[in-house]
């Protein structure tokens, strides 16, 4: 049996997108499909099925390249909205996912905006082990104490502010924090350099993937912790290795919006 798919990316964060009402592949098969030498190659598999509520456009699940399932993916949500729009969906639509609902808008310049929900800073909701909520937590790592900010954007994030993102210890600190005992479900770890109040540079070590060219929820996490700390404006340009997104957040009680490209690379079929 063959599986039809669309290869897409948002700022180089790449996806195998499958529209199917069937059950997704097992983790072992997902890992094989993700292999960049012998498979399709991707950061995440996006499995798009029919919505539970007929008023919504679709329901999607997200699987990392290691076969683990994620709760949310900002770049992936934009790609799904773009794909559905090319197949006849409205330019404004609602997507269902494990974390709830996300509104999406196809903009006139070709970019896509997705509402990622209200950021949740409560440590028990990230989840992150802490006695009480704080803006900054001290985390011990190999004899070093790091200042870490945490937030849920539908999935768990830790954000470290660094003076220079180019020299940030992503390869060493990223995997150690991703699997730190204080993150029971692991976490995406962002390293953020504040350039101005409206501009940051970012590198992300993504849970189940490794360092990625872009992470949409990571961009949202970095922006909102910076906005909460008073470092950043309501709308922030986030530069990642793969390109630029804009993150907008009006504050508590409001959703965070992520805007950026969503590109179709090719379509194909592969053995299921």
Image: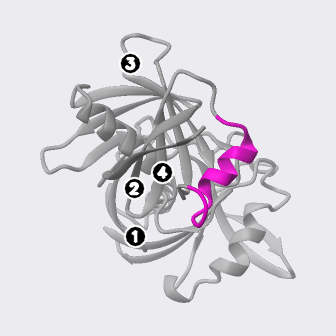
Q: Secondary structure at mark 2?
A: strand
Q: Earlier in the sequence, mark 1 or mark 4?
A: 4
Q: Earlier in the sequence, mark 4 or mark 2?
A: 2
Q: Which residue is mark 1?
A: 242
Q: Secondary structure at mark 1?
A: loop
Residue 271: percent from the left, percent from the top? 58, 41
Residue at horizontal 38%, vertical 56%? 10
Q: Which labelled disc corresponds to residue 15? A: 4
Residue placed most toward the observer, 191 or 140: 191
Looking at the image, can residue 155 be seen? no
**Residue 70 located left or right of residue 182:** left
Distance, label 3 to label 2, CA atoms, is: 23 Å
Q: Earlier in the sequence, mark 3 or mark 4?
A: 4
Looking at the image, can residue 79 be seen? yes
Report the mark closest to the observer, 1 or 2.
Answer: 2
Query: What stretch of residues is rendered in magenta?
Result: 25-39
Distance, label 4 to label 2, CA atoms, is: 6 Å
Distance, label 1 to label 3, CA atoms, is: 30 Å
Q: Secondary structure at mark 3?
A: loop
Residues tagged 1 and 3 counted as in contact (Cβ below 8 A): no
Residue 120: percent from the left, percent from the top? 58, 42
Residues tagged 4 and 2 counted as in contact (Cβ below 8 A): yes
Local packing at callout 4 (Cα closer than 10 Å; few below 14, some 14-19, many 20+) is many
Q: Earlier in the sequence, mark 3 or mark 2?
A: 2
Residue at horizontal 69%, vertical 45%? 29
Local packing at callout 2 (Cα closer than 10 Å; few below 14, some 14-19, many 20+) is many
């Amino acid at each position: 049996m063959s599986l039809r798919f669309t290869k897409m990316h948002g700022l180089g964060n790449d996806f195998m997108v499958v529209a199917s009402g069937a059950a997704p592949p097992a983790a072992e098969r997902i890992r094989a499909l993700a292999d960049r030498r012998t498979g399709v190659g991707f950061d995440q598999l996006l499995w798009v099925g029919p919505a539970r509520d007929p008023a919504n456009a679709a329901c999607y699940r997200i699987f990392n390249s290691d076969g683990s399932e994620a709760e949310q993916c900002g770049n992936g949500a934009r790609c799904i909205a773009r794909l559905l729009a090319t197949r006849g969906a409205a330019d404004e639509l609602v997507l269902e996912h494990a974390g709830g609902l996300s509104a999406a808008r196809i903009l006139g310049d070709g970019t896509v905006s997705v509402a990622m929900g209200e950021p949740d800073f409560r440590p028990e909701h990230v989840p992150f082990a802490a006695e009480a909520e704080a803006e900054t937590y001290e985390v011990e790592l190999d004899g070093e104490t790091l200042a870490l900010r945490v937030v849920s954007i539908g999935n768990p994030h830790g954000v470290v502010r660094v003076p220079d993102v180019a020299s940030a210890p992503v390869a060493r600190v990223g995997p150690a924090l991703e699997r730190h005992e204080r993150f029971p479900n692991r976490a995406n770890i962002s390293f953020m350099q504040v350039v101005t109040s409206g501009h940051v540079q970012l590198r992300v070590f993504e849970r189940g993937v490794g360092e990625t060219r872009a992470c949409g929820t990571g961009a949202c996490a970095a922006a909102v912790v910076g906005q909460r700390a008073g470092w950043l404006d309501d709308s922030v340009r986030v530069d990642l290795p793969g390109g630029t997104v804009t993150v907008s957040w009006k504050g508590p009680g409001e959703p965070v919006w992520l805007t950026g490209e969503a590109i179709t690379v090719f379509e194909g079929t592969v053995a299921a």
